[in-house]
Image (tube, helix red, strand yellow):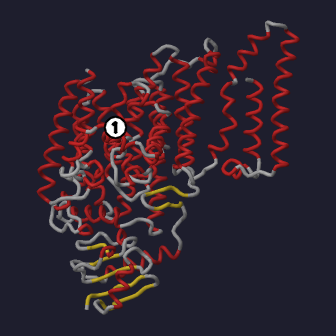
Amino acid sequence: VLALCAASLILALWQFAGVEAVSFAQDNALAFATRRHLVEAVMAAMAVAALVAGGYVTVVGRRGIPTLDRVSRLGAPLLLSTFAPALVFRDTRDPFSTAVSIAAFVLALEWLLRISLRELEGTNLASDGLPSTRLHHRIGLIAVALGAACYAAYMSKYTIFSHRRFGTYNFDLGQYDNIFWSALHGYALRCSPLGNFAPWSELSNHAELSVFFLLPFYALHPNAETLLILQATLLGLGAIPIYLFAVRRLPPRYASLLAFCYLLYPPLHGSNFYDFHFQPIAATFVLFTIYFVDVRRWILATITFVIAIGCREDISVGLTLLGLYFLLSGYRPRAGIVMALAGAIYFVVIRFAVMPAFGTNWFADIYKDLYPQPDGPHNYGGVMHTLVTNPSFVFHSLLTQDKLRYGLQIITPLAFLPMRRAYLLPALIQGSLFTLMTTAYAPTTDLGFQYSGHFTPYIFAASALALGAYRSGENGSVRLRAAVVALCTGTLLCTIHWGAFPPSGMIKGGFANVNFARPSDADRQKDHDLVELAATVPPAAMIAVSEEELPHVSGRLNVLTLKYGVGNAEYLLYAPSSQGGYVGTQALADGSFLEVAQRSGLVLLKRK
């Protein structure tokens, strides 16, 4: 073991120091002469380790063997050091292999750490230190609050940079800005970019009633950038209920680490960089609900429950399951039955009575491979029939490489903690229903989209419970500390590959890869010209705008996306190179619109 540890260290050090390390790790590209020298160095390291161990036994006799055995157990985690360089060199070419490699590394590291930490039991190094005090708790809370504030500032900065570089779109930032702007001006849940012109008609798409809760904050500075700041701030705030929930079961330092792992959680970053959405925002209010129920703060729990359930109609499914969990586990059963009934009734009424009254949407089609054949209904009801009558077919639909990769990206940063106790597995149901169960919509299994928000609150709460169970179980200190190291390692490695920290390279946000560059002078001039041109259009006139430009001028009553045609627009405003720009170019060419004004890279047309 000691010889293998020495070999592994030599390989790791060479890879970290070598100028050819990245190509070696990713493509096995290395000059053969250099490779031969590397083999010689590895063999020499193994020989030196063996000679030192043999010399030690020769000098002290057989009583030295237990000491060597103990040293080998203490050093066991070093066996994995040779794999570390390849895992920290960011590689976006094969996320499936990367996800599998990180998962295997994290689990192996935890197993070897348990071996090592058991050798430290009974020593000062193994001690968990002094008992946690109120001061430790306050220090932990302050640290987490500062971390949340830094997250909010960091994400606000770079998502606004992306917006100002025209990296946001009508789908979905422009639409949400129009919904908020319309509500602020007396047109509740109206979204003209989606063709929902009547008040409340957006209910045909989603029941996002918590728009009204966020509206006072939006009113402070009503534009799309305010929504980006609101989203970053609310997502960062999620670290606080995680800490408060975890610290009731763990020492403050471990609870703080779990909260910081949340802030470094790559799925959180991907959804943060994709415009604006309510699923990740709802996760924060679900986390607060879990904490407030835990400490019996019923009024606050009711408020956060209502805000969470109002974020989107599908959030109520998770809250119903959470209520059932409280009820069936016997932990806060009265609160559980209220939550379960309220969530179930809300979902049924909203999804099957209120929303259909305002129209239909396409979202059931993301389960279309689960529609019963040949003549079953092609809607959510049909999907439910398949779930009940043909579970083997449903299970088979889960067995795809993309879904396995996505599942590993979701759970590996948490070192599989929510899967380590059977009673914690329900934490995976909500997210699985709205991501892994889907069959015809790639974004639901992509970290760059908002759907990971269905997992976040439940799996982080479950992780706190799993760590708490280790603390109180057999070999509790060893198992807890090894799990915490695995948790931090999994989070950091996944963040390197798919997260937003540090601000280098790119991160997947929605359908595009987003970089961290500042807006250029040309971007700033384009934004100025765009707003100036839009201001020349009468406020009540119908205007169609190209996709990348629409979020910059979506704060008006009647705005359409040019992506799908001119519709009944009186004006067209577009960049010829943007999505939908070709529609404007064609309208100008066929004579149906006349050019009114032009700026560098922008054109304003008026219907003839």
Pointer 1: what residue? 287
Report which quarter residue 66 is drawn in: top right
Give the residue at x 88% y 11%.
59
**Residue 236 in the image: x percent, y percent?**
42, 46
Frontmost residue, 108 versus 184: 108
Decide: is 537 above or below 172.
Answer: below
Left or right relative to 64: residue 102: left
Quadrant for the C terminus in the image: bottom left
**Residue 111 in the image: x percent, y percent?**
58, 25
Q: Residue furthest front?
A: 374
Residue 195 in view: yes
Decide: is 74 above or below 371.
Answer: above
**Residue 421 in the image: x percent, y percent?**
40, 24
Give the residue at x 64% y 16%.
120
Quadrant for the N terminus in the image: top right
Secondary structure under tag 1 reads helix
**Residue 10 in the image: x percent, y percent?**
77, 36
Left or right relative to 25: residue 144: left
Frontmost residue, 181 versus 265: 265
Frontmost residue, 447 versus 457: 447
Q: Amino acid at mark 1?
A: Leu
Decide: is 404 above or below 573.
Answer: above
